[in-house]
Image (cartoon, grey):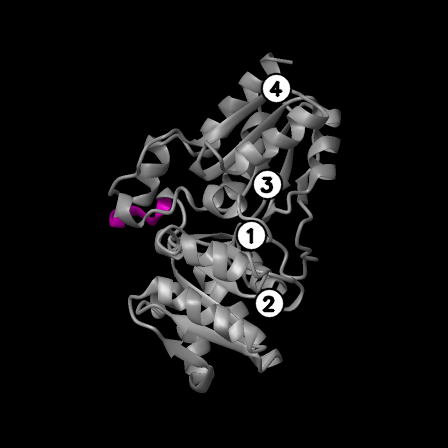
Amino acid sequence: MALVARELIPSRTGFGKGLAEAGALNPKVVGLGADITASVSMNLFAERFPERFFSMGIAEQNCVGVAAGLALAGKIPVFSTYGVFATIRTLDQIRISLCYNNLHAIIGGAHAGISVGPDGATHQALEDIAVMRVLPNMTVLSPCDATQARLCTLAAIENNDGPAYIRFGREAVPDFTDENQTFEIGKAQLLAKGTDVTLMATGHLVWEACQAADILALQGISAQVLNFHTIKPIDKAAIIDAAKSTRAVVTAEEHQLMGGFGSAIAEVLVMNYPVPVEMVGINDMFGESGKPHELMLKYKLTAVDIAMAAERAIQRK
């Protein structure tokens, strides 16, 4: 498929641009920071709309409570910090204050995945998908690049009801999706057609899945690639159609295997159209400090690893 990246840019930049753009379109949008405004690119909103941005300090649970109050008052609050703190430290408040009341508030989870690198296990969000997707009323979004992160943020603010969680990364990654793409929450994006196996990926591993398809093509294997920028609600129709078409599936995520994106795919397939599934992700362990590319290699999250998983899935047909 030979996709070409326009540039390397962190997906957090797309989140920040989308938030600033949404703020210009809708005066109800309010930003809440947790003392790391620039690290999550909320500075783009704060600098443009200082009267609508509030730095809450390192008090993530309080941020969620304030967001709930603002939502009840008719505002659209957007709260962001590192994904581990945005989801796990605040779980009780998200569950009761936001989800139980089905309030329209957006949570941005930065530093998602292993590729955050040197910050290590304490700051690598590897459980956030599992935690967020189990909550009733919660929408879970995982854009693959900065361009899509921008569109994802705009959609979560303007075209979604209830709470939404958006996960994104810190490191510069290939920005490759169409700048004029149609983005719809809950709809998977077909990036390549194929007949032998379907590579279903989310977040930063979508690029790796595309590269894996090229590797497989050199071996005479035709791989379909689907980008799941929405993990909840999951696109059941796309999953089932792909399974019927290729009869073998590989899932790829920068997250724990248990309870994550791969589990969401498997839940759909086991109830509707069971086929061999191989999963690429973090296998029940914490991350560690290191250079992003070294960690991707160590934890077997690269295009080569996805291609090898595809070969295993095909052999199981």
Residue at position x 30%, y 69% in the image: 35
At label 4, which amino acid type do we have? Answer: Pro
Mark 2 sits on what residue? Answer: 157
Residue appearing at x 58%, y 66% in the figure = 104
Specify whether residue 174 is in view.
yes
Question: Between disc 3 and disc 4, whose residue precedes?
Answer: 3
Reply yes or no: does residue 206 show up in magenta: no
Q: Which residue is mark 4?
A: 276
- Position of residue 157 measured from the top left corner of the image (x, y, whole percent): 59, 67
Residue 260, above or below 95? above
**Range shown magenta:** 115-119
Q: Are marks 3 and 4 in contact (CB under 8 Å)?
A: no
Question: Which label's residue is closer to the chain start, 4 or 2?
Answer: 2
Local packing at callout 1 (Cα closer than 10 Å; few below 14, some 14-19, many 20+) is many
Q: Amino acid at mark 2?
A: Ile
The answer to whether 42 appears left or right of 245 in the picture is: left
Q: Which label is found at residue 2?
A: 3
Cβ atoms at labels 4 and 2 below 8 Å apart: no
The three-letter amino acid code for the residue at tag 1 is: Leu
Q: Earlier in the sequence, mark 3 or mark 2?
A: 3
Q: Is residue 277 left or right of residue 7?
A: right
Residue 141: mark in rendering: 1
Helix, strand or loop under label 3: loop
